[in-house]
Amino acid sequence: MSAQDIQSLVDLGATLAQAKAALRDGNDVNEAATRFFEGRYDVVVDADDEPMPEASGSRVKRAARIETPPEEAEDDEELEDDGEVEDFAVDYDSDVEMQPQRHSDGSGVDPYAGIFFSKDRREEVIEVEDTPKMDKLEDGTLIPIMTQGEWMKGCPEGGEQGLLFQLYSLLSSAPCGCPSQCGHTIDRDKRMFFGITPKFSAYVANLRASVSHRCPTCSVLFCLACGDRIDSEKASAPDYDPLFHCPNLQGVILGIGLFKLEHLHIEQSQGPNSDPAQSNANKKKRKVTAVNDQVESNDEVLRPTVFPKGKKAKGGTGYAGNPQEDTSGQLEALMAQQERDTEAASLMEEVRVFLPSLCRLGGARTSDYLVHPTALAHLRRRFNPVASSLLRNDSLTDMSDRNTLYFELFEWLETISNHEALASMMAMPIMVQTSSTPLKVQTGLARRGAGAEPGPRERTIIYEGSSGPRELMESIVIQAQAAMKGLGVVQDEATREKVMTEEEKRQSTLVIPEQAKGKAKALPMIDDNVKLRKFCERIISTAASVDRSLRETKGDAFVERLHASLPKIHSSTRSHSETEVIGATDAETQRIYVDWASRVRFEYCDLTTPPPPVDPNDKPAPAFVDDPIPNYLHSYNGEIRMLANADIPKRSLAIAKELAVLTTNLPVAWDSSVFLRVDEARVDIIKALIIGPEGTPFLFDIFLGPSYNQQPPNVKYITTNGGRFRFNPNLYADGKVCLSLLGTWAGPGWVSGKSTLLQGSLHVLISIQSMILNDEPYLNEPAWSESSGTSQSMAYSANVRRMVVNTAMLGALKSPPEPFGDVIRTHFRLKAASIIKQLDKWLSMDDGRTTDGRNHGDAGSILRGESGGSQNGFKRDIEELKGIFRTLSD
């Protein structure tokens, strides 16, 4: 136990007592460091007056250190006992890091359960940031040398921490001896392995030129990364590349390459001085569940609009938009985005060359078989955040426009899934940084004396589990499948399972990743429909290729468990009564509701209606008896039937893009949500159930007509009590939705070719949702928007509440509108307790007047109406509604 070894561990963040304890238990400093990173000595405390041993030439450093929970210690010990890193006897597949889930009865262990169901993991890690030393290349260029803290940054896994430390220590300080044992030794040059050149290609070229060393004593050629002999005959072959000689080179090259990729992505998306920890924290705060509880969206714009209590909608609601939208600068922005994407894709392609691949052109190399254990660590901590950011894109159109970058991303996902050592990463949760403390100088450094070199700064990072790569990819697969439906492309099972050939992949690439005068060059624009279809085919093919590779490398059971956890879009309405809230707290109930609503908010179903029975005595038979065009359960049935065989490419493209957004981005919240049902065969036919902020369901029929989206959709309001009730100044009893976005009111609104059903808080679904029910619906009328708190407004609200209970709640439960029967029943069952409290409050606020279904004019008719007291039926309706709630809970 030398002072140098002790100092090495102290530099890594260990206390003096922890360093001594680790060295006593370990065979060498590397093993001692691994034990320390596993958290085995967290309880060891230093004596306050114990002096620090001196070690010449030392510089204070501290690597990232994970604080491992005590219950994980046994698994860590098993991992260590598998073998030494140097002889690659360990299982590189990190499945062994996951806690197996034992069944409640103690029988059986699912070895992969932790991969799919451990997204609730939370790790707290101390990471450091120290100033890198600068070094000069032969041409005089100054470059930074990657510090140990930066090398190990972003890794919350204790076992992987040790692997990273060992490789860095070996290549930065350990001398390399001639394998012939002639006595010749050469010091490794840290600049060679960890010098960060401006271009990754320059780093690779420098390393390739210097990593092979010929012994001046015995003329043996050997590798400075591993110290092993290089066959001179092989080295003289024209296709020999010394960078594939050993796993150590693979580990360091991937580490540097992915470091550069991560930082380029951060710089491009957030600016050159962005803090990735804070960026991820912001994303986590804005997380909204999508498709099911395992897919997230970070789009802040798509959240439901709910008016603050007591606030009015200035100028009325639903009268907004700007057809004179300023589009200047959009072309420049698009070109700038293409340049950034080309730069990122080029770097990804350069780094992908060094990913382990047994399908490498020209045959697999040594490092393809002997994968360095840090390869998985690099991918999980550096590549995963980049892939996660790109896969969370909720716009299929944007992804298609950026296909240069996305096609390269798909190549990465296929390559990773093809290698057994890396494949499990596709299903493992991504640990993302959600928060961090400010940087501060390490404590306890003052005792080193005045004038000492400033020590590194540290911060505490919180990592939390999130959806894994394959799970994130499924959300864009769903978008792609929906877009294919919108384009009229019929997909059978064989098509969905097809894996593209290399030639088909090349044909599907629509933008060439080359640069000319600093600008990306595009191929001649082909038909937009074909472009989108090819991109969707590539997405679906990549997912099929990943699944096929996982099945080959991990087995059928692995893939079946994976698929069971993936988000799904259902093809027909089904029962959702399995969701229970008995005994749940308010917070748990709200979470259960959001999880349920997220699973069922978008579904395909059959909206056709069966033909009426034919009386054989009727002659002649009705024309529709032999009519091949079906009828639909929809207000626009006539218009729908007229477009049964229409082929309108621009409309198909608009619908395809629309569906891609709607499948995964409908707003869901405890207070208000949107549910859609789309006809399986006619995706231009939509029924919407919009839940107002007070938990009230309202039904709308939507038809995307022949001029969509050059013109707005056709929208009709259905919840009218047979055309008798008007709930809002914007919602007429005959079903008219008075909204400038729909062209049903004067004023700016729908932007031709740009507006959509959902995108943006001023567009149709969100606009309707925001005005359905709020504290003062009277204010939705522009002429009355300054009447907040007036007697007219209060009377209007009381009248609306009576109609809501009678029709939107009680009527919906007694005769649920199809195809939302199950949704309405489950909605009211989950929210019964909350709505009952709301009903009691409404009853206490009621003015006792007779309900006026017309709800128009200046509310004078409502004010002049007779006070019916308990005879207006409001109390009776509430009691009946509560009785139905009790039966729903039974």
Image (cartoon, rainbow, N blue to C red):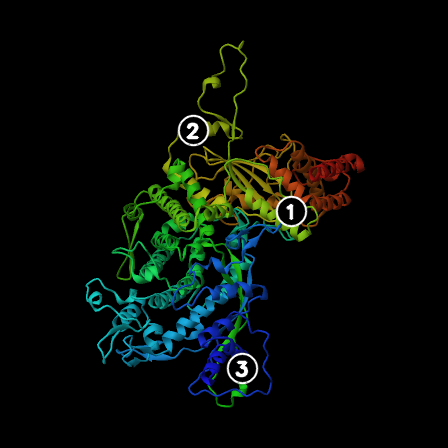
How far across and how far down the image is residue 593, in percent? 62, 47
Report the Cα–Cα distance between label 3 and label 1: 64 Å
The residue labelled by disc 3 is 16
Q: Nearer the viewer, residue 792 or 469?
A: 469
Q: Within the image, what quadrant is residue 728 found in? A: top right
How far across and how far down the image is residue 580, in percent? 65, 44
673 to 9, vertically: above or below: above
Q: Nearer the viewer, mark 3 or mark 1?
A: 3
The residue labelled by disc 2 is 644
Q: Nearer the viewer, mark 2 or mark 1?
A: 2
First reached walking from the N terminus: tag 3 or tag 2 = 3
CB-based contact (under 8 Å), mark 3 and mark 2: no
Report the Cα–Cα distance between label 2 and label 1: 39 Å
CB-based contact (under 8 Å), mark 2 and mark 1: no
Q: Residue furthest bottom?
A: 450
Q: Residues within 10 Å of mark 3 (few under 14, many from 20)?
A: many
Q: Quadrant of the C terminus?
A: top right
**Residue 774 marker:** 1
875 to 424, vertically: above or below: above
**Residue 847 marker:** none
Element type at mark 2: loop
Element type at mark 1: loop
